[in-house]
Image: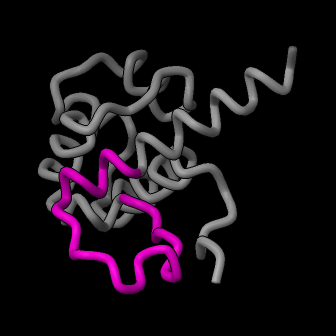
Amino acid sequence: MNDILSMNNHEAVLRFIDFAIENRGWNRSRLAKEVGMSTGWMSKIMNGDIRLSVPMLLQIAEKLMVAPASLLPVMDVQALEGAEPMTFENYCRKIVTEIVKEEVKKALSQK
């Protein structure tokens, strides 16, 4: 089975955040205010111009009152079969590692 989400992991996280914002009855400006950042900075994050850090993801989840894991994409189930359970921190590291690998691969293919 492949990843349930066919989009880039970072894009998936941003979509989940947008979904959580909408379910909370907020907009991106309200979220920016709640996490203590400018609407311009939040816009850059949500448009994918700036990568979302794990600490920021945790802060966003807290303000939206959702579990941090609910904002992360589903991983390849086959790759996890027989594996030890992961902590949230290790899961985040794995997602970030996958994103970095994708970006390096894209950069190398453009040369």
Residue 109: x percent and y percent?
84, 27
**Which residue does the image show at 19% across and 59% down from the upper left?**
88
Q: Position of residue 24 (x, y in %)?
A: 28, 61
Total marks placed: 0
Please identify the quadrant where the N terminus is shown.
bottom right
Task: In this rendered view, identify the residue nearer to me: 62 or 109.
Answer: 109
Quadrant of the rendered image containing residue 59: top left
Magenta part of the chain: 72-94
Q: Which picture quadrant has residue 69?
A: bottom left
Q: Residue 54 sits in which quadrant? A: top left
Image vertical order of residue 89 relative to residue 19, above or below: above
Q: Name the quadrant of the C terminus.
A: top right
Residue positioned 35% across, 66% down in the render: 23
Left or right of 59: which side holds 100? right
Q: Is 20 rendered above or below residue 61? A: below
At which x and y percent is residue 67?
A: 19, 65
Q: What's the residue at 61%, 68% (across, down)?
A: 5
Q: For this view, does 3 lie left or right of residue 25?
A: right
Q: Is residue 47 above or below residue 74?
A: above
**Outermost front residue:** 82
Tell me the residue at 38%/32% (across/down).
52
Instruction: Check residue 68 for magenta coloring.
Output: no
